[in-house]
Amino acid sequence: MSNAHIAILILMGLAFIVWAVLWFRALFKLKRIADQRRQEAGRGYFSGMGVTFLVFAEFLTAPEHRKDRNRVGIATGAVFAIIILQLVMLH
């Protein structure tokens, strides 16, 4: 395995770790918001699933989630860019 292969694999691994951390942070934040709204509405976990779906849908459009959306989008773009770089450089 050449040094280029090793460098690309390390870069891809680091990008994936960053991507995963950002997604998990966003998902836990959304779950926390959904749990608070469910408790305020007096609903149980399963009867309040609609609230959870609404909060997750708000992630796509709400201005307060723009920072998280942008971070996840950039990380996703970086992962795809590294995959394309690997295909172009190493094959």
Image (tube, helix red, strand yellow):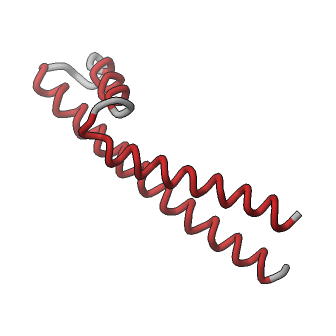
Q: Nearer the viewer, residue 55 or 85?
A: 85
Which residue lies at the image location 73% right of the left edge and 62% below the top edge? 85
Q: Is residue 44 above or below residue 66?
A: above
Q: Nearer the viewer, residue 91 or 36?
A: 91
Which residue lies at the image location 30% right of the left edge and 38% below the top edge? 30
Is 91 on the left-hand or right-hand side of 39? Answer: right
Q: Position of residue 87 (x, y in %)?
A: 81, 58
Q: Quadrant of the C terminus?
A: bottom right
Q: Nearer the viewer, residue 44 or 66?
A: 66
Q: Position of residue 42 (x, y in %)?
A: 12, 20
Count of labels shown? 0
Q: Quadrant of residue 79?
A: bottom right
Is 18 on the left-hand or right-hand side of 85? Answer: left
Which residue lies at the image location 67% right of the left edge and 61% below the top edge? 82
Which residue lies at the image location 43% right of the left edge and 57% below the top edge? 21
Is 27 on the left-hand or right-hand side of 77? Answer: left
